[in-house]
Image (cartoon, rainbow, N blue to C red):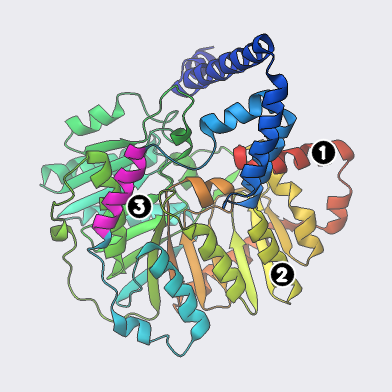
Amino acid sequence: MRKLLKVLTSRVVIFGLLILLQVGLFFVFVYRAALYYQIIPFLQAFALALVVYVINKQEDASYKIAWSVFILVTPVIGGMMYLLCAGRKMPKKLYYGTTQANHHMYNLLQQDPDVLKRIEDKPDVSKVFRYALHASDFPVYTGTDVTYFSSGEEMFQVMIQELKKAEKFIFLEYFIIGEGEMWDTIETILEEKVKEGVEVKLIYDDFGCSTTLPRNYQRRMNEKGIETYRFNKMRPALIIQMNNRDHRKLMIIDNKVGFTGGMNIADEYINKINRFGYWRDSGVMVKGNAVISMTVMFLGMYTFLKNDDLSIDYSNYLNQEVRKDYQGLIQPFSDTPTDDADVGLSMHLNLINYAKNYIYIDTPYLVLNGDMQTALCLAAQNGVDVRILVPHIPDKKYVFQITRGNYEVLINAGVKIYEFTPGFNHSKTIVCDDIFALVGTVNTDYRSYFLHFEDGVLIYDNPEIIKMKESFLESLKQSQEITLEACRRVSLIPRIYRGILKIMSPLL
């Protein structure tokens, strides 16, 4: 009973009910006003005109289809709802705040032309790196060591070791932080480091932590000397910016060491608690020159949240010793909904289009837009070995139905799909031809591609790529391959349900 009461009085439930109430009142108001003023035919005509406008916008095709269907099915209400909360535009404060802060930070980054010369004789490779450089201003680096972790447990132990070495600053930016053994261990170290004079700054997403942290947690951390900010504070209002979340996972220490990957800071990520079977996750530790870009990512968000003067000099956070020339090239990058480039999606597409022999993809959600579906099918039909590993035990059942609804068309084109039978696959990695790999926070879904703040690390010609490949193949031994026959045995009602969810997935 206490557990139920706690759920019912949580911020998510209360805010959700308030938003549903607003939606209901809005529907009633619009419908009654339309009846009273006898303008339903006008609203229907307006809905048709609006659909023409939506279809011709320069936006993702699946998003346009979803809104067009909703408007046509509910012409009286749909058009009004589109005007009220559609589009990926954000309030001016959020849009210009993050944009200006990020552009200010990017001025601290410089591309070494000698690095790009190393790949000038490889146009396909150069093209992949130059896209992220031009679209998001993040340089390509040598002088960087990368370590891949195939589990949250393994990564957590190294995180603890590196945190204890901190001398100047620790930056943390996470979508989810949950109280428990993992966070308690980290928090204890952070408190000790504050006493030693180390700067500790923490950013967490307010929605992501709405059920995992107390309401007064930001104040509690600040009282301990840990400078803490909540990104995009939850409000019980029908406003579009609630869709824009900080989905990054960054831990940066002294501008020498950076961690990122799929893992948030909560006990399920290191399998101290069992939520959806065994939780499979992954990440990377970056040491050396490329950490500068990760530090800059954090400082951009920090500057916006602190509402700081953009003239402040943050160069003291970017000082680091000269590193030796480790093998390969590294390019950390971020993606934000405040720019005109869908960097996360385009990085995925670039790797799929580059692949000549194989491409292996780890993802918790297979919610594909048209571009991704076409690219995957075309690669498989061109003879590329395309394999995708998804969970067998889902964390969100409706998303899992959308994921399974995408199987048949992909398998029919030659893509191999596997479900990780021990539990939930939360890893977000791509391995390609033993030469390229990508690790980060970007899911293959609409929210990551278009709505969230994300980050990733592109890796080229590094021994850890083989380690990532081997980890993927080892996981396939614990997975079941989905056959075309199994897809075709699905009965009519689940097919209809999945079809509807797939159409509406950009709005979910």
Q: Secondary structure at mark 3?
A: strand
The percent coordinates of residue 508 (x first, y second) are: 61, 37
- Which amino acid type corresponds to the residue marked 2 in the rendered image? Leu
Q: Residues within 10 Å of mark 2 (few under 14, many from 20)?
A: some
The percent coordinates of residue 111 (x first, y second) are: 29, 74
Alpha carbon of mark 1 to alpha carbon of mark 2: how far? 26 Å
Alpha carbon of mark 3 to alpha carbon of mark 2: how far? 34 Å
The percent coordinates of residue 65 (x first, y second) are: 68, 44
The residue beneath circle 3 is 250
The residue beneath circle 1 is 496
Cβ atoms at labels 1 and 2 below 8 Å apart: no
Q: Secondary structure at mark 2?
A: helix
Q: Residue at x 61, y 75 (%)?
A: 355
Q: Nearer the viewer, residue 316 or 262?
A: 316
Q: Nearer the viewer, residue 48 or 492?
A: 48
Q: Is residue 168 left or right of residue 365?
A: left
The residue beneath circle 2 is 378
Q: Quadrant of the N terminus?
A: top right
The percent coordinates of residue 38 (x first, y second) are: 69, 14
Q: Is residue 451 left or right of residue 204?
A: right
- Which amino acid type corresponds to the residue marked 3 in the rendered image? Leu
Where does the magenta region start and end? Answer: 92-105
Of pointers 1 and 2, the one earlier in the residue sequence: 2
